[in-house]
Image: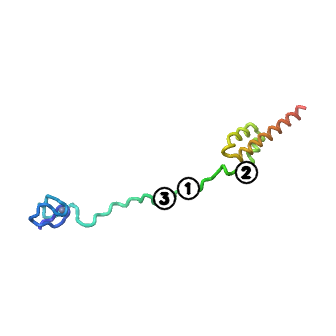
Amino acid sequence: MKVCNMCGSQVADNVTVCPNCGNPNLGVSQPMPGAPVPGPQPMPPQQPMPGQPMYGAPMPGPMVQQVSNDKGNFGWAVLGFFIPIVGWILYFVWKNTKPGDAKMAGIGGIVGFCFNFIVLLTSSL
Ligand SMILES: [Zn+2]
């Protein structure tokens, strides 16, 4: 009996090629030290599973829809009241994206402009 030095299977002496793995070199009667040992192969090191949930990662929250906020912030009206030009600029910048804030800033600018106009008229009289 010979032992295949590739796969370790026992081969008859008159056979020159291993019937199991096709190894043509059957001169060695014992497996070479360090040769592949027949049997279950050692498992490769554990790889991190792709798609495993990441612990500690921030959960994506629901999308905050700013456009739906039509009430507007009264602070922009106050800002537009004191600085009408800024209020009108904000109105034109926001009228498509934030109509509520744009309306507040625009109204504040108009009211502030009228208020300043009246103040100027009354003070000049
Ligand atoms: Zn073999």
User: Of callouts 3 and 1, which one flags the residue occurring earlier in the amino acid sequence?
Assistant: 3
86 or 12: nearer the viewer: 12
Q: Look at the picture and state if 83 lies above or below 53.
A: above
Q: Is residue 92 left or right of residue 24?
A: right
**Is residue 81 toward the left or the right of residue 22 in the image?**
right
Question: How many dots with numbers?
Answer: 3
Residue on which the image places disc 1: 60
Q: Is mark 1 within 8 Å of ligand 1?
A: no
Mark closest to the chain's N terminus, 2 or 1: 1
Viewer-proximal residue, 83 or 64? Answer: 64
In this rendering, which labeled residue sits more in front, label 2 or label 1?
Answer: 2
Residue at (62, 53) in percent of width and height = 64
Q: Secondary structure beneath disc 3?
A: loop
Q: Write down the residue under mark 3.
A: 54
Helix, strand or loop at label 2? It is loop
Confirm or deny contact between disc 2 and disc 1 (CB under 8 A): no
Between the residue at mark 2 and the residue at mark 1, the CA separation in whole angstroms equals 26 Å
Percent position (x, y) of residue 81? 78, 41
Q: At numbered mark 1, what does the secondary structure look like: helix, strand or loop?
A: loop
Callout 3 amino acid: Met
Residue 25 point in image, percent of width and height: 13, 58
Above/below status of 52 relative to 100? below
What residue sits 88% from the left and 31% below the top? 124
Q: CA distance from mark 3 to mark 1?
A: 12 Å
Where does the image place residue 55, in percent across and percent down from the top left? 50, 60
Q: Quadrant of the N terminus?
A: bottom left
Q: Identify the residue position indicated by label 2 in the image.
A: 71
Query: Which residue type does callout 2 highlight?
Result: Lys
Quadrant of the drawing holding the C terminus = top right
Q: Nearer the viewer, mark 3 or mark 2?
A: 2
